[in-house]
Structure formats: C-alpha cells, structure tokens
Image (spheres, rainbow, N blue to C red):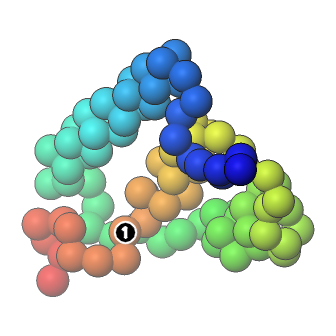
Amino acid sequence: MNEETLDPASPAEWAEFQALAHRMVDEMLAHLATLRDQPAWREMPPDVRRALGSGGPASAGEVPRAGIGADAAYEEFVRNVRPYPNGNIHPRFW
C-alpha cells in the first residue's frame, strides 16, 4: 500500500525543511523582539483581504488542488498574515 505523507522524502528534503524551520523561528523571534517599535494595529489592505478571502492568489474563490510548497506558503504568511495580528501580542495592545 502506498501511504500518503507530508514528511520529506529524502535526507536532502529534510535538510531543506530544517533550514526553513530555522529561518521561520529566527524571523519570528526577530519580529517579536521589535514589537515595541511597530504599530499596535495595522489595517489589512483590501488586496490582502481579497487574497485571503478568495483562497489566495492560486484561485478565484476555489480551494487550491495542489500545494504551493513550504517556502511559498511561509512567504504568503509573512506577507498576508503576520503583519495583521488579531490578538494581544503587542505591549501597547489594550
């Protein structure tokens, strides 16, 4: 039986995943360390709202049938999600 998995298939893919994971942690820690210098709230621009509401740039309202890859998914998160938190992570968010 052929088992479907999201695990990397080779040592090279594991190394790529590890590098991305380290980058993600490093960038999030840098982001959190600079929260005091950032606005407590940012309005989400209409193009970002449309991208998130329509299922992203890969579709026009439909759920994508194919993945875009971990790197591209992380880039979409950095561009469309992280700048617009909807919770209490900022020191001046009351």
Image point (29%, 61%), residue name? 39
Image point (65%, 40%), residue name? 69
The residue nearer to you, when weighing 12 against 84, is 12
Determine which residue is flagged by label 1: 85
The image quadrant of residue 91 is bottom left
Image point (51%, 53%), residue name? 77
Q: Is residue 48 above or below residue 10?
A: below
Quadrant for the C terminus, please.
Answer: bottom left
Which residue reaches farthest front?
1
The residue nearer to you, when weighing 13 against 77, is 13
The image quadrant of residue 25 is top left
Q: Is residue 37 above or below residue 11?
A: below
Left or right: where 39 falls relative to 59: left
Q: How many marks?
A: 1
Label 1: element kind: loop
Residue 83: percent from left, percent from top: 42, 57
Residue 11: percent from left, percent from top: 48, 18
Crowding near pointer 1: few (<14 within 10 Å), some, many (20+)? some
The residue nearer to you, when weighing 84 against 43, is 84
Left or right: where 33 falls relative to 58: left
Left or right: where 18 falls relative to 9: left
Q: Amino acid at mark 1?
A: Pro
Q: Is residue 60 above or below residue 30?
A: below
Residue 88: percent from left, percent from top: 21, 76
